[in-house]
Image (tube, grey):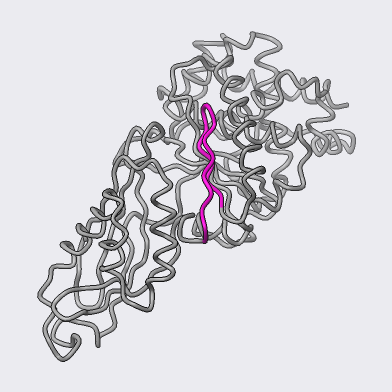
Amino acid sequence: MGVRTRAAALLCCVAVPAALLAGCGGGGGTVREDPQRMLNRHAAAVLKHDEAAFLADVAPAQRAAQRTVYRNLARLPLASWSYRLVRRTGTTAKVQLSYRLTGYDSAPVTSAPALTLAPDGGRWDIAGGSPAELWDQGTLRVVRGTHSLVLGVGASQASLKAYAADVDRAVTTVSGVWGDGWARRVVVEVPGSLRDMAALLDAAPTAYQGIAAVTTAELRGSSASVPADRVVVNPEAFGELSVLGRRVVLTHETTHVATRAATNSGTPLWLSEGFADWVGYRGTGRTARQVAPELARDVAAGRTPQALPANADFGTTATGLAQAYEGGWLACRLVEADWGAAKLVALYRAVGTGGGTDAAMRSTLGIGLDDFTARWRAYVQRELA
């Protein structure tokens, strides 16, 4: 699945019941502590590996659950961890969590956990919250590969090691095409179920049913670049794949991580998704009809597509989603067949610099988008008929 922006906004509303506002604290006292001070203290406890201090900022009823969260966080190679209270007006506060994993994140990743605050004498405690991240969903297991960090809840150590081995292999494959000018490190999150995956992506489970994995991303500021931050697995769909299928999927997602700096909002999805599939299937020996069975059925029925897949065709619940991926893959395969793999990489990079797909094609392939589309239609017909 393609690079996606985390659905959760960077800021989240933290509902504080009226009974918990300053002036209504325990014993009728006023809560004079700035909530930001408590959040700073809580973040420092995470980085200092101070479980007692971490739990001291948690309401008693939540301490058992938060002890598990703390121990999960202690397993992570955290380079930074901080909270920012954006605004508190009346019963609403807005909080942003930023963190960075040593060796994997070049910039902080932001998240928006929903917290409920409760007064404790003259200070604030954390009295509850929504599970916004994988470490909130249960006991976390962590496996480190040569190029991978795999985080799992509800998965065995052996299965997480298999993910790490496949991602390590994928990094080598992707670098063989794209080069070594990227981090060559991939973080994989394996939740316990489709529902848990959807919760991480702030989406309905139906949006990802049948989708084996996605690569999340965050748009930072006004930048058009789309950095791919995490590969999130749907364990239910992924578990139905063959050994080859799993390797193709993880190579596809690893490609998104590698190409993130060269991908922007102007990169058509037929190119970004098609390129990721092209890398994933490269060297597998699979024929066009084996990789594109749905599109082959359409061609056999006289429904050869007239245009390259539109971005809307790649929606997770879109009709013809399979055909969109297959069409994008065939477009990239055509570029390799007629111009060579190096030209395909050059095309991807050129599109990422801006200026449009047509201009990038003219500069790298020597033909415009309309001519390429006509050549692609003939190629689809020839390869799948």
Please give left or right for residue 210 compared with residue 220 in the image: right
The kind of secondary structure the magenta stretch mainly shows is strand
- Left or right: 378 as drawn, with respect to 110: right
Q: Nearer the viewer, residue 283 or 153?
A: 153
Please give the name of the residue rendered at 66% of the width and 51% of the height, measured from the top-left corner.
235
Quarter location, residue 297: top right
On the rendered image, what quadrant is the C terminus found in? top right
Does the magenta run of residues contain 119?
Answer: no
Q: Quadrant of the image for the N terminus?
A: top right
Q: Please provide percent x and percent y for residue 179.
A: 51, 14
Q: Vertically, is 342 above or below 64?
A: above
Question: How many numbered discs?
Answer: 0
In the drawing, does residue 371 fall left or right of residue 244? left
Of 351 and 102, nearer the camera is: 102
| Residue 352, position as x, y percentages in the image | 44, 24
Q: For residue 107, which quarter of the picture?
A: top left
Identify the residue at horizontal 24%, vertical 83% (top origin). 20
Residue 238, percent from left and from top: 70, 46
Name the residue: 64% across, 8% down: 339
Please state the extent of the stretch shown in magenta in the rendering.
138-152
Q: Residue at x 84, y 33 (%)?
A: 296
Q: Position of residue 152 (x, y in %)?
A: 56, 49
